[in-house]
Image (cartoon, rainbow, N blue to C red):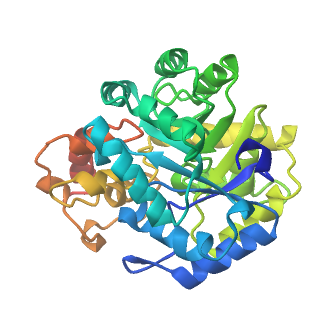
Amino acid sequence: MGFETIKKNFGFGFMRLPMTGEDVDIPQTKAMVDAFLKSGFNYFDTAHGYLGGKSELALRECLTSRYPRESYVLTNKLSGNYFNTQEDIRPLFQQQLEACGVEYFDFYLMHAQNQQRFQQYKQTRAYETALELKAEGKIRHLGISFHDKAQVLDQILTEYPQIEVVQIQFNYVDFEDPKVESRKCYEVCRKHGKPVIVMEPVKGGSLVNLPDAAQRILDQLDGGSNASYAIRFAAGFEGMMMVLSGMSTLEQLEDNVGFMKNFQPLNSQEREAIEKVCAVFRNQGLVPCTNCRYCTEVCPQAIAIPDLFACLNGRRQGQEANLHTISGGMPSDCVRCGQCEEICPQQLNIRELLTVVAAELHQ
């Protein structure tokens, strides 16, 4: 299984599943998996830390225990906060296989690589261990997921030409963003001849729940969903092996597979519209948080950082924002340990932003 068995260029990310309280909504997730496969798609993506460890288990219950292994393509990742030494990697990998209920992964990615984390992976010989697992048939293809500048990506792909695929954050707002460098990272992948997997094509939902001014722009088009313009933008570039979507409802899934079944890239009118949407985002000064919630997993004060940033963004868009509706610690609880910033894929200056939240929302 692997490149040759991927049916279409649209994948189901198991990061933002439907939830009932703290637990995954298993019946709805099963219905989503069934609809996804029935529509002719077969690529699934997870990681050990997604949903506090519940993603892999949900995948086993909803997919791998119910369908033959050859009917789907499965990607998992080696996350840096779950190992400290080379000796930790194989037991963690075996735990992931068991949690997912499979004997091998089609793709296994070195997770969330940046300049600092790449050094950790080199020092613990994580790449070499993954290549050994590949030689043993437990990994079909080795890749990376990446959050840093294009220069760092070029360094990694130069040092490890064995990397077969690269997952990058890529959407129309981040395309020319100097902090994310989506376009430049994409160009590095093309330079090295690596197929691209797109994550965050709708930027954590930001390109679905648009500011009013941006929504008015897309409303003038031919009636496609906001998600359709974002996902089709990402999928329209050469070399895009897969575009992932972290879908949370059956309705979202049905919308996405509907326009990706017979994929059409954006036309000139649609491209012009999203350029105008980008201008709206630039002018509003919104915090580019994608609600991945990695920060909340490491925060010793249990501060609901993404929810606070959502409140701040809402206020900047003229909406009501009330900190007291948020469950979790407040900005003033921050002890400035910096763990959130070390793990943030967006490389946000979270500690400083929390002081901005407190000031603008009058904690």
Of 141 and 227, which appears nearest the observer?
141
Q: Please state the total of marks drawn on the protein image.
A: 0
Location of residue 117 (image quadrant): top left
Left/right placement of residue 196 relative to residue 122 reads right
Indicate the quadrant where residue 265 lies: top right
Percent coordinates x, y for residue 220 in the rendering: 79, 54
Q: Nearer the viewer, residue 62 or 314?
A: 62
Residue drawn at (30%, 25%), measured in percent from left and top? 123
Q: Residue at x 62, y 78 (%)?
A: 30
Hey, which quadrant is residue 164 in on the image? Answer: top right
- Asked whether residue 161 appears in the rendered view, the answer is yes
Q: Position of residue 143 (x, y in %)?
A: 56, 36
Q: Quadrant where the C terminus lies?
A: bottom left
User: Does 113 sit above or below residue 16?
Assistant: above
Image coords of residue 323 (percent x, y): 27, 66
Q: Is residue 349 visible?
A: no
* Residue at 35%, 61% in the rendered image: 307
> Residue, x 39% and y 33% (percent of image)?
126
Q: Is residue 152 left or right of residue 72?
A: left
For the residue pair 209 and 338, the one nearer the viewer reads as 338
Q: Is residue 167 left or right of residue 239?
A: left
**Above or below, 168 relative to 123:** below
- Which residue is outermost to the front? 136
Residue 105 position, x and y percent, is 57, 51
